Image (spheres, helix red, strand yellow):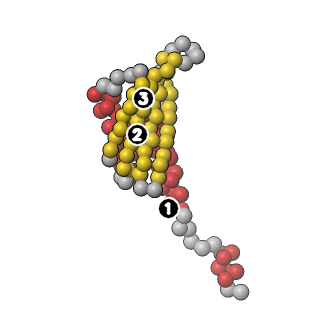
Amino acid sequence: MKVLINSNHLEVTPAINEHLAEKLSVIKKHFDQILQVSVTFFVEKAHEKELRQTCEISFHALGKDLFAQSHHADLYKAIDLTIDKLDKQILKSKEIVKNHHHPLCAKHISAGMD
């Protein structure tokens, strides 16, 4: 898995890298075919005059491109929220694929017997 990290108005420290790697391992447990992950951190001034930390994560896997973004006053919390959003998207897409092969319903079976 290739991880690309970009940042605007923010220095990415080893602690941030470590926290991100730990959280990405959770996603890798659910979906191990991830090819590339792009992470963007940036700080912007909100209208309330407080700093707003933003984390954007997009990843490309075999057949899937997913994206999530979160804002929070704490960057670590923004990372956690973004990973939670991606985790929900992955589980939902896996559920759709699993339920795609449902058994034939009775309506189709009775129509074929005529």
Q: Which residue is mark 3?
A: 41
The residue that appears at 34% across and 26% down in the rendered structure is: 12
Going from the N terminus, do you reach mark 2 or mark 1 first?
2
Q: Is residue 69 above or below residue 42?
A: below
In the picture, the disc for residue 38 is 2
In the picture, the disc for residue 80 is none
Q: In the displayed structure, does residue 6 sit left or right of residue 69?
A: left
Q: Is residue 112 above or below residue 74?
A: below
Q: Quadrant of residue 106?
A: bottom right
Which SS class for mark 2? strand
Q: CA distance from mark 3 to mark 1?
A: 34 Å
Going from the N terminus, do you reach mark 3 or mark 1 first?
3
> What amino acid type should be assigned to the residue bearing mark 2?
Ser
> What amino acid type should be assigned to the residue bearing mark 1?
Lys
Instruction: Please name whichever residue, 9 or 32, is drawn nearer the observer in this view of the structure.
Output: 9
Mark 2 crowd level (few <14, some 14–19, many ≥20, 10 Å Cα): some
